[in-house]
Amino acid sequence: MKKLIRITTVPISLKILLKGQLSFMSLYFEVIGVTSLGKEINEVREDEQIRVIPLSMSRKITPLQDLNSLWQMYWLFKKEKPAIVHTHTPKAGIIGMVAAKLAKVPIRLHTVAGLPLMEATGAKRKLLNWVEKVTYSSATKIYPNSKGLHDFIVAQKFTSSSKLQIIGSGSSNGIDTSFFSKENVSDEKKIKLKNELNIHAEDFVFIFVGRLVKDKGINELITAFTKMQIKNAKLLLVGQLEEDLDPLYPEVTKEIQQNNNIISAGFQQDVRSYFAISDALVFPSYREGFPNVVMQAGAMGLPSIVSNINGCNEIIVEGENGHIIPVKNVESLQIAMEIFIENKSYLSQLKSNARLMIENRYEQSVVWNALLQEYNSLLKHQF
């Protein structure tokens, strides 16, 4: 079997972003995971039944540490002699692709699943642009996981369009619709959770799933929600508050804590029950690659209100399975939420399309087989 090395900067990405895909690929390749040290490494080894090699990489800008990581990665490739190296996340991308090129790995692939530089300015933006260009020039092929990212990369002239390809309809890993199904959540479980969260039968529940940070549009979401004059609306926040990296406005944090109609459930390992007791997803993020949350909500039968950014505006088709609003626009967000509550026939129509549109385009097996076909095609032309 030829060796395939998959790399992420931190182990949680290897565990979640590529869940199931690594074990699927191990049917056809000797798959090796490479990532920084962390408790999830053992979970990936056990869940995916692959070898995982720890190699320290920093998510921050740390030139000396990055050079050391590059050196270690180079010697790892020289030792393992992989046919394919495939990286995800920015730091793993530049270290993995440069090291693979130096080690003369024949097939060097990088998936782009969101670009932090989109919100950066000044010197930081210039540095991050340079990182992308070096990564792409070292790779033999680049996989943006959405059309929006593809077009952004072309517009920024990070690489030639001939080097870019979207796998399937987009997404890095697709979605397991047999797992994300409302059939998996019993009525008893829904009733119990509603009671715990003080949600009543007549309440309309908007759910947000993700990190509670500025970049996810939480400031705008809380502002829009509090402006609505609808008594039976509830906002369910499922995610961790991150006060160090990208904090919310103090008044927004205070509103979350004090407003009885805003329920903060914290991070949850399994979000299916929370989707099952909700009526619609609201996801006003500033930037995404190809957001799993929007696919998960759709698979659970929920329509979505999303911002007009790449990924979101591909999963959601306006007026078919959700509503698309301008980025950072409180008024549009408020209006969309009010329409969902007040126009029951429109909401019902969106709900009826939600799951089917995910199944047809983003079922996990479809995405995995499309990537496998791509690997085999590259190998056929290379060897």
Image: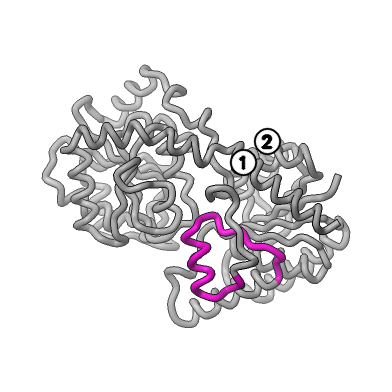
Earlier sequence position, callout 1 versus callout 2: 1
Question: Image point 82% across, 55% down: which residue?
Answer: 83
Indicate left or right for 257 with 166 as reference. left
Q: Are marks 1 and 2 in contact (CB under 8 Å)?
A: yes
Residue 191 sits in quarter: top left
Residue 336 is situated, as x and y percent measured from the top left of the image, at: 22, 48
Residue 317 is situated, as x and y percent measured from the top left of the image, at: 36, 47
Q: Which residues are magenta?
A: 138-160
Q: Nearer the viewer, residue 179 or 11?
A: 179
Indicate left or right for 323 with 18 as reference. left
Which residue lies under the disc numbered 1?
19
Question: Image point 38% across, 52% down: which residue?
Answer: 212
Residue 377 is situated, as x and y percent measured from the top left of the image, at: 75, 51
Name the amino acid type tagged 2. Answer: Asp
- Crowding around mark 1 (Cα neighbors within 10 Å: few <14, some 14 to 19, many 20+) is some
Which residue lies under the disc numbered 2?
47
Name the amino acid type tagged 1. Answer: Lys
Residue at the limit of the structure toward the left, as seen here: 229
